[in-house]
Image (cartoon, helix red, strand yellow):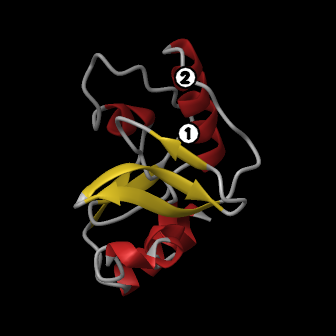
Amino acid sequence: YVDKAYENDIALGARVAKLDAPEAVRALFPESVDVAVRDTARGFINYEGGWAWASQGIKRAIALVGSLGGTIVPGKAVVELTREGARATGVRCADGSVFTADLVVLAAGSWTASGFPGLGLAEQCLATG
């Protein structure tokens, strides 16, 4: 998988660098960041885009929200951001419910541009995978 992904990125003209050892992966992060990398890890970095282990990221984000006293509301399909001018103030869900917030984090990955066309991100968020 890694080799094919690397070849795909090269074919697309992306700036990439091979990471042939766990130390090369760890070196990408500040020393204060705990990076769990297997002893057999290898891969590459795409400086213009990339791939993330989404399920692990979501688990960590949910744990962080909970530790900060936030509430997770599962099963809600967000259909639009509510706004005051250019500032996002919350979300409106498919069932009509609205959640307001001091800070809105939009983490929809490659679906961001198509899921929220009103943001005009089609030229900035391009899924190439």
Q: Residues within 10 Å of mark 2 (few under 14, many from 20)?
A: few
Mark 2–mark 1 CB contact (< 8 Å) = no
Nearer to us of marks 2 and 1 is 2
- Looking at the picture, how far across and down is residue 95, in whole percent? 72, 59
Q: Residue at x 53, y 70 (%)?
A: 111
Identify the amino acid type marked 2. Answer: Gly
Is 77 placed left or right of 120 in the picture? right
* Residue 57: numbered disc: 1
Q: In which quadrant will I find the N terminus? A: bottom right
- Looking at the picture, how far across and down is residue 79, in whole percent? 58, 66
Quadrant in which residue 22 is drawn:
top left
Q: Between 12 and 78, which is closer to the camera in this rendering?
A: 78
Q: Of all residues shown, which one is farthest toward the bottom?
A: 11
Q: Is residue 103 visible?
A: yes
Please say if 50 is above or below 101. Answer: below
Is 10 placed left or right of 91 in the picture? left
Query: Which structural element holds mark 1?
Result: helix
The residue singled out by tag 2 in the image is: 70
Q: Residues within 10 Å of mark 1 (few under 14, many from 20)?
A: few
